[in-house]
Image (tube, rainbow, N blue to C red):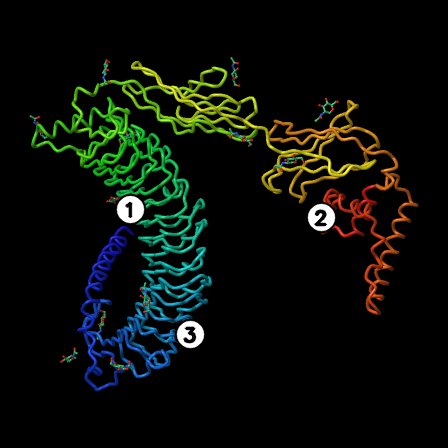
Amino acid sequence: MLKATTDLSVQFFSFLVMSFLFSHMISMRSDATNTTDSGWGSGEACPENCTCRAMDYPKYRSLFNKTVVCTGVQFLNNIFPENIPLDVEILDLSHCRLTRLSLRLTLKHLRFLDISNNDLKVMDRQIHKLTALRQLIMRNNSLSYLQNGAFSGMLYLEVLDLSNNQLYSIEPHTFGGLNYLKKLNLEGNRLHFLSPQWFVSMPSLGWLFLSNNLIGRLKANVFEMLSGLFTMKLDENRISYIEPGAFNGLSHLRILYLTDNLLQTIPSQELHNLPLLQYLYFDKNPVLRIPTLAFHSMNLSMLTMSYMPHLKVIEKESFLNLKHLVTLQLHDNSELVYIDPNAFVNCSHLKNLYLHNNKLQSVSSVLKDSLPALKTLHLYNNELECDCNAMWMKQENLREISNKTYRSVLFGDSLLKCGSPSNRKGILLRDLPLSALNFTCAPVIIPLFRRSYNLSIGEELHLECYAMGLPSPKITWRLPNGTLLDKENLRTGRYEIRNNSRFILRYLYESDTGRYSCEAQSVSGFDTESSIVTVNNKPVRISAEYVAGNFITISWNGTRNQWSMTGYEIHYKPLDNSEKFQIIPLDRRLRQFRYTFTNLSPLTTYMFCIVYVFETELYTVHCTNITTGDEDLSTTGITHINSKMIVGVVTSIFMLLILGCCVLVVRRVGKRKDYLEPLYSKDTESLIDVIPLESMYQGQTTPAACSSRTSLIQSQD
Ligand SMILES: *[C@@H]1O[C@H](CO)[C@@H](O)[C@H](O)[C@H]1NC(C)=O
Ligand SMILES: *[C@@H]1O[C@H](CO)[C@@H](O)[C@H](O)[C@H]1NC(C)=O
Ligand SMILES: *[C@@H]1O[C@H](CO)[C@@H](O)[C@H](O)[C@H]1NC(C)=O
Ligand SMILES: *[C@@H]1O[C@H](CO)[C@@H](O)[C@H](O)[C@H]1NC(C)=O
Ligand SMILES: *[C@@H]1O[C@H](CO)[C@@H](O)[C@H](O)[C@H]1NC(C)=O
Ligand SMILES: *[C@@H]1O[C@H](CO)[C@@H](O)[C@H](O)[C@H]1NC(C)=O
Ligand SMILES: *[C@@H]1O[C@H](CO)[C@@H](O)[C@H](O)[C@H]1NC(C)=O
Ligand SMILES: *[C@@H]1O[C@H](CO)[C@@H](O)[C@H](O)[C@H]1NC(C)=O
Ligand SMILES: *[C@@H]1O[C@H](CO)[C@@H](O)[C@H](O)[C@H]1NC(C)=O
Ligand SMILES: *[C@@H]1O[C@H](CO)[C@@H](O)[C@H](O)[C@H]1NC(C)=O
Ligand SMILES: *[C@@H]1O[C@H](CO)[C@@H](O)[C@H](O)[C@H]1NC(C)=O
Ligand SMILES: *[C@@H]1O[C@H](CO)[C@@H](O)[C@H](O)[C@H]1NC(C)=O
């Protein structure tokens, strides 16, 4: 198995060589195109302006093959030329503005077909006839979909290049029968997802290029059949989630591109599922942190994580036991302020560490000393704290100056600039005298939190902070009431501390309002940074919208949208009554910001509260007192429903219907418009309005006059 992959790698490199040669070929092409040439020997016809010769063709590894080159030639009607010698082996029809293939010829010997840079919109069914084809290059056409069996018949196809088309739909068995395919290029299309069925019959697929599509998520087992895959490119997509098991089966993958996607966390679990992965390109993802054990015990030799605009922190032991790692690129992360001194453990072969163009305030000598093989360390263009923390850099610098045979690991130390303390900002470290630095210094906190937070009850508070200084300081957290939390890891009640440096307080109460401080202490001194946290009640208010004798409609506002009512309840009871509150949960079945309470007593004051609930906690957000009207008013509101009323209502509905029919008839006969109007009194209309169907939990249909009434009656039964 291992040998097989080495073969693949050899092929990969020869492929690189070929593409190199090809790029040279472009400049030679004008020489190769020979307008006067015809056939190979037997005077066969050659399409006008094409070259038909037995020759070596570098685009395809060929030796003296029968080659027809028509690149750039304009054919009649922009379709495939008819007079191509039937025994052609290599055919180049790139840049011919072809709109259709309409392949009528049977080119049994054709091994290489380049129809790139044309304007083909559909795959031609006749392409089946090309049974000997090894390489099909269809780059830069206008294909938008591919159908099942599109390539069936091309039993020996090894390379299929469909890049830079408009493909958005590929049927599950499109690539069925391509059992010898080695390279599949689908770059630069509009694919939104990948289907595992595409890859079912391709045991020899070594290269799969899917860059620059619209893929948003990698599903579990999607590459399961690709056990021979060597290189996979998934860069420039919109991948935001890699499902567990997405990389199952990729037992030979060595090179993986995930650059320029939308991954917010490092998919460690999935990456650890790639036993032979050597090169991982992970730049330009919106990752916030590289957490502990993000990469451990993998076979990586090169890893890039640069140009990540959100990356702030590299935690301790984030690179653990990477014994083959040689090069690590972590530069141009404009927010990266902190790298833990113990970020690297057992990375015994790491030679090149690129940390330039970040915002790092210090890189500990501990970090440098933990990398025995380190040869090159780029640290320029950071915001170094020029105190004891920079001492080792200064020493390296001086040692190199005084000893001609010593080579410092620090590359470009003439560019090491101080960012702090404030009186040294902008000064080059090189220009500071050694005496300006000490071997120990007081802690300096690097807070990763804002000066203040404005949160709502129920939300979470996250504070994170680190500290520099020698000896290394200990971090503790202080609560508003003065209590000190000094455990390295803690989880009690609503509080959590992780690795000393992250403080989390869940389910905020209004009483959690106050100043939260991160404190750093060592024998050399003390530093503290704090944040003022304000916990607000939710800005939701309730008010009476309609009041009758036996029912009240209330409405509320202030929730961000109508779908975010989860967690809210309305509690109500008569005010002068000690009975328990009745509870109405507000969930998404309620489409409107209102609710009608029925079965109330007339002339009674009720207390309505909107309450926010999470876990076992309960917050009263806002209350209001509302008094129901008297009996008279309630008659309009249909208080005492009895059979007479029902009969009355049913009768009136019936009469309404009859009237409706009359109106229709009248309208047909003549034009008597305002006939119906007096029947809808103002009162009835508003009554109908304030009794939404939803409050009866009866589905979401638009309330029509009749159905509102009937549902009201039902609810009273
Ligand atoms: C075309 O090919 C012939 C024979 O190989 C050669 O003599 C001639 O110079 C070529 N013409 C061009 C324009 O390359
Ligand atoms: C054409 O090229 C292929 C691949 O290099 C080779 O195997 C084949 O023998 C060549 N055909 C001729 C007629 O030279
Ligand atoms: C062949 O080339 C000549 C000169 O460039 C051009 O006038 C002619 O239209 C071309 N014929 C075809 C079929 O492309
Ligand atoms: C695609 O093909 C067209 C037509 O030949 C050409 O003008 C264009 O430059 C090509 N685009 C790319 C990216 O190769
Ligand atoms: C890990 O990678 C190295 C090259 O970096 C390679 O020599 C070695 O065989 C790989 N290990 C395994 C288990 O494949
Ligand atoms: C580092 O490697 C050594 C030797 O391989 C091993 O004994 C040790 O446990 C490793 N350290 C960690 C933290 O894994
Ligand atoms: C100079 O550096 C070399 C290489 O690191 C070392 O072997 C040598 O001992 C150093 N010489 C002095 C005088 O420090
Ligand atoms: C170095 O340490 C001494 C005593 O600990 C202190 O007085 C002095 O200010 C420190 N110098 C700097 C540059 O921090
Ligand atoms: C905090 O948020 C509340 C509402 O969410 C707002 O009324 C208040 O003005 C905000 N306070 C500050 C200081 O921004
Ligand atoms: C301070 O607040 C914490 C958390 O609310 C509480 O556990 C602790 O008892 C309080 N301490 C004092 C002295 O009030
Ligand atoms: C909510 O309603 C109350 C009373 O009806 C009003 O005073 C308040 O401005 C409203 N708030 C919002 C955010 O609309
Ligand atoms: C409702 O009435 C009670 C009793 O008079 C009073 O204590 C309470 O504050 C009132 N609530 C509101 C929101 O007005």
Report the amino acid beneath label 1. Tyr
Residue at (78% x, 45% y) in the render: 686
Report the amino acid beneath label 3. Arg
Residue designated by label 2: 699
Q: Secondary structure at mark 2?
A: loop
Q: Position of residue 314 (x, y in %)?
A: 34, 33
Report how far apart the C-alphas of labels 3 and 1 lie in the structure: 39 Å
Q: Nearer the viewer, residue 325 or 600?
A: 600
Q: Residues within 10 Å of mark 3 (few under 14, many from 20)?
A: some
Q: Position of residue 699 (x, y in %)?
A: 71, 48
Q: Secondary structure at mark 3?
A: helix
Please indicate whether residue 239 sits to the left or right of residue 602 in the image: left
Tags 2 and 1 in contact by the CB under 8 Å rule?
no
Q: Residue 279, labelled with which disc?
A: 1
Question: Considering only vertical position in the picture, is 207 above or below 472?
Answer: below
Q: Position of residue 197 (x, y in %)?
A: 45, 59
Which numbered mark, 2 or 1, is in the foreground of this view?
Answer: 2
Report how far apart the C-alphas of labels 2 and 1 lie in the structure: 55 Å
Query: Ligand 5 closer than 8 Å to the CB at disc 1?
Result: no
Question: Considering only vertical position in the picture, is 395 above or below 43?
Answer: above
Total labels drawn: 3
Residue at (82% x, 69% y) in the render: 668
Where, by quadrant of the figure, is residue 328 drawn? Answer: top left
Q: Nearer the viewer, residue 41 or 389?
A: 389
Q: Nearer the viewer, residue 614 or 482?
A: 482
Residue designated by label 3: 125
